Image (tube, grey):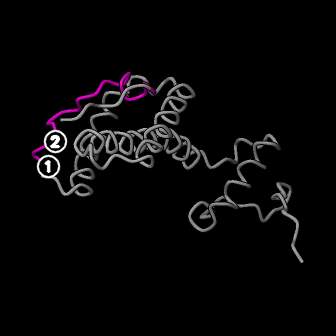
Amino acid sequence: MATAHRKPDVQSPDLRNEGLYESDFHAWTETQAALIRAGRVGELDLPNILEEIESLGRGERRELVNRLTVLITHLLKWQFQPKRRSRSWLGTIVEQRRRIARHVRENPSLGPFLREAMDLAFEDAVAIAAAETGLDRALFPASLPFTFDQLVDPDFLPGDL
């Protein structure tokens, strides 16, 4: 028999923040939410709440870099291995473009981070593309050959080398 999900009782004297963040993250989040709902902001675990909020922002940047890495990897493979092009590669390119465009649209403050994200992604993408294709890393460009507009342009595909 399944037990119903119970919110922490903020009236309970057992409600403590000490160590809960490290020992039971889920319970910690429920406790923080219950304290906010009860207006007991003085009891909030502010240092860890701050860390979690900052972590959310870092996660958005990580997601952008990860999606750019997948996209750039596939564009490089498309460019450097024209005889191996596949619908699967094209599907990945289309999917990542749509998700990147949506992610940037939903998080416009990532705009100033785009250049850095593209550079980080390119570095990883070259390593991955070289490993997946068996081509020497030296064959790939030294810097990203695509603009952000090209990366998200649904009609752009790099030509054969």
Name the one closer to the observer, 66 or 132. Answer: 132
Quarter holding residue 123? top left
Q: Is residue 150 magenta?
A: yes
Residue annotated with mark 1:
137
Q: Quadrant of the C terminus?
A: top left
Q: Is residue 49 left or right of residue 13?
A: left
Q: Amino acid at mark 2?
A: Phe
Q: Residue at x 38, y 21 (%)?
A: 149
Q: Is residue 154 left or right of residue 121?
A: right
Residue annotated with mark 2:
140
Q: Position of residue 106 (x, y in %)?
A: 57, 28
- Tell me how far mark 1 sits from mark 2, CA to CA: 6 Å
Numbered range of the magenta stretch: 137-154
Q: Position of residue 114 (x, y in %)?
A: 37, 28
Q: Residues within 10 Å of mark 1 (few under 14, many from 20)?
A: some
Q: Is residue 158 above or below residue 140?
A: above
Q: Secondary structure at mark 1?
A: helix
Q: Residue at x 39, y 48 (%)?
A: 86
Q: Secondary structure at mark 2?
A: loop
Q: Is residue 142 left or right of residue 25?
A: left
Q: Position of residue 19 (x, y in %)?
A: 59, 64
Callout 1–callout 2 Cβ contact below 8 Å? yes
- Residue furthest to the front in view is 83
Name the one closer to the observer, 105 or 73. Answer: 73
Q: Amino acid at mark 1?
A: Arg
Q: Position of residue 48 (x, y in %)?
A: 56, 50
